[in-house]
Image (cartoon, helix red, strand yellow):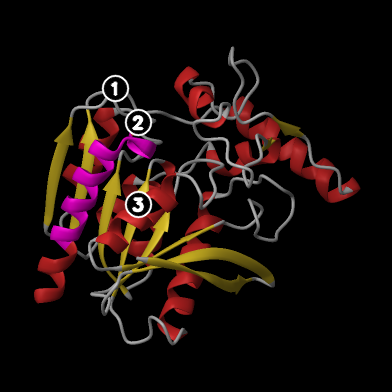
Amino acid sequence: MRTEHFTFTNDGDQLVGVLHLPEGEPLAAIVTSGPLTSVKEQAAGAYARAMAERGFAALAFDHRTFGESEGQPRQFENPIGKAQDIQQAVTALLADERTAGLPVVAVGVCAGAGYMARAVADDARIQAFAGVAGYYSDTADAPPSQEAIARGRAAEQVWRETGVAETIPAVAPDGGDVGMPLREAYEYYGTSRGAVPNYTNGYAVQSFAYSADFDTIEAAARLAVPFTMVHSENALVPPFARKFYATVSSPKSELWLDSVGQIDFYDDPRLINAAADAAAELFRSTLAG
């Protein structure tokens, strides 16, 4: 396996990625998307490496406003915007000489599985989809906080008027006013375990106006390609995952693994390898027709 620099643009912003290439001719091109506030050197990169080891060309990239990619305000979490980034990544993969002519498939991790579901539902060029430890937000069973949405809208108005974006930490040791209040999120992003140099521990407050009411179930109902779901009873909100899976009407399979929690899906080789094997099996069977 080798890695190469990969860039593309969306709405005038340059996005920066790493293309993980197998030793031989790739079976397909994979676009990945990772968890909330994450960058390409974290979970998305781990799965891209694992898929390259299984014979695929796999792209991990920094979404707009994160990491090495351009975009303002920084650390702005916009699910629809991230789904659009994915679609532009597909366009770039289909045009790049290293991956042109290859079928395109997708892997999404945690929140990235929800963003990927929306991208796959909207883009017929993506031929199969694997969701790993997905956070499948469900606004019907868990209505969004109107207070959070109002806070996000107020912060966005200030940013538009002044250019100053209010930012809070993504994680903190004791939770509090953060983007991700889970203690295990801090144990990954807030420590040397996951806090790579390219990562910024920040969350633009206006993100709440976009992320709080993002729903994945509507995308599940529109999926038209083969799907596999890898999850755990200890990962985020298993009832949401089950509802998402039940709503998908295309060919589907599921794999339930034993994890400590959500975050070990990001860096535990046992979980990554099992999930990558399941994704590779789906993609090979899909491409075999």
Amino acid type at mark 2: Asp
Please state the horizontal and vertical placement of residue 26, each as a whole percent of the image: 27, 76
- Quickly name the residue at label 3: 47
Q: Nearer the viewer, residue 50 or 113?
A: 50
**Residue positioned most to the top:** 174
Q: Quadrant of residue 128?
A: bottom left
* Residue 258 on the magenta span: no
Distance from Cα at disc 3 to Cα at disc 1: 19 Å
- Quadrant of the frame with the N terminus: bottom left
**Residue 226 visible:** no
Q: Taking 4 as reference, is 199 left or right?
A: right
Q: Mark 3 near mark 1, Cβ–Cβ under 8 Å? A: no
253 w.r.t. 202: above or below: below
Q: Residues within 10 Å of mark 1 (few under 14, many from 20)?
A: few
Which span is picked out in magenta? Answer: 265-282
Please state the horizontal and vertical placement of residue 135, each as a whole percent of the image: 37, 38
233 w.r.t. 279: above or below: above
Q: Mark 1 near mark 2, Cβ–Cβ under 8 Å? A: yes
Amino acid type at mark 3: Tyr
- Quadrant of the frame with the C terminus: bottom left
Distance from Cα at disc 2 to Cα at disc 3: 13 Å
Please state the horizontal and vertical placement of residue 65, each as a whole percent of the image: 66, 53
- Quickly name the residue at label 2: 264
Residue at 82% from the left image edge and 45% from the top image edge? 159
- Quickly name the residue at label 1: 260
Residue at 29% from the left image edge and 44% from the top image edge? 132
**Residue 267 visible:** yes
Q: How crowded is mark 2: few (under 14 residues within 10 Å), some or many (20 or more)?
A: some
* Label 2 residue SS: helix
142 w.r.t. 220: above or below: above
Residue at 39% from the left image edge and 49% from the top image edge? 46
